[in-house]
Amino acid sequence: MTVLTDLSSALADAVQAAAPSLVTVLAARPVSGTVVASGQVLTVAHLLHTDDVTVLGADGQRRSAVVAGRDPSTDLALLRVDGLDAPALAPAAEVRVGELLLAVGRPSSGLQATLGFMERLPQPGGGWLPTGAAPFRGVSGGALLGADGGLAGVLNAGVSRGELLAVPAQRALEVAALLASTGRVPRGYLGLATQPVHFPGPEDAPREGAGPASGPQRGGRGGPRGPSWERGWARRAGRLGLTVVQVEAGSPGEAAGLRVGDVLLALNGEAMRHPRDLLGRVRGRANQPVTLKVLRAGEEQDVTVTVGER
């Protein structure tokens, strides 16, 4: 046995272990589905044009299913399947950049898999997980497996043309739990429009005697000190915030006294560098209080806001 054959055998074993937890969903066109709990299957929502569908299990039996709920933002739908006794896939350990991934689905042609590679992490705020795997017909709704064979995400080939993406497992399972209990996914919001702002630090200030015509300064290690270098240094130092440029009338933000011109530095102690960070962190906190660290008129203060629901 060689390293390559050992790896190949391990990949095949992971696919076979996940196979009982994958079904075919006979929607507008056949797609895959991933079992996430007893009698519950996650699949893509955009192909479910009715609330009653048929599911073909790994055992070859057809079963009736009902759509328990849909979540437009993740394009996920939860199906309740009569008589389905298939095991749920356990979540994978944290997926790291550089890990191998397996995209596994059960289209109408049967079990199928492609190999992927974790090239980069998803964008902050709950973005899509890039799989690095080649899409195939009917893969949407299938499972993205981590190196340990656990569920790393639920696949979707319809988000970006020619690219296979996935809803990260933690987010997908949160959506499934909400759809199972309430039939919907409440969306938290603050009613604020923001844009990033960069706060120069002492290192950003020009040295004495240096003016616009002095040319680029040099850092302590002798490297170039142009604007792009200083922007990068500022980001590494965390010198970024979000300036409030609009407060929606009647919104939770207005109720908490937030104003245009306030700078949001952190939410529950976590720094924010982009508006999507704020949107992502409040999305799942509807009706919950959060603490914003706000810079106003040169002074920092904590403001408690109860996140609204949409």
Image (cartoon, rainbow, N blue to C red):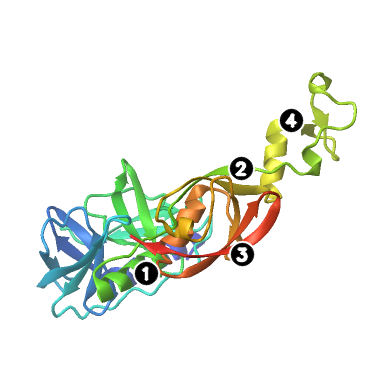
Residue at horizontal 38%, vertical 75%? 90
**Disc 3 to disc 2, C-alpha distance:** 18 Å
- For marks 4 and 2 on the same chain, the one whose residue lies earlier in the sequence: 2
Q: Name the residue under label 3.
A: 269
Q: In this view, does 262 lie to the left or right of 48?
A: right
Q: What residue type is labelled 2?
A: Val
The quadrant holding residue 24 is bottom left
Q: What residue type is labelled 4?
A: Gly
Q: Is residue 102 left or right of residue 53?
A: right
Q: What residue type is labelled 1?
A: Glu
Q: Name the residue under label 1.
A: 174
**Disc 4 to disc 2, C-alpha distance:** 19 Å
Closer-to-camera residue (302/265): 302
Q: Name the residue under label 4.
A: 226
Q: In this view, does 33 lie to the left or right of 306?
A: left
Residue 96 at x, y = what percent? 53, 60
Q: Which amino acid does label 3 sit on?
A: Gly
Q: Name the residue under label 2.
A: 197
Circle on res. 72: none
Closer-to-camera residue (275/222): 275
Query: Depth-wise, is mark 3 or mark 4 nearer the camera?
Result: 3
- For marks 1 and 4 on the same chain, the one whose residue lies earlier in the sequence: 1
Residue 152 appears anywhere in the view: no
The quarter in which the C terminus is drawn is bottom left
What SS does tag 1 mark? helix
- For marks 3 and 2 on the same chain, the one whose residue lies earlier in the sequence: 2
Badge 2: residue crowd in 10 Å (few <14, some 14–19, many ≥20) = some
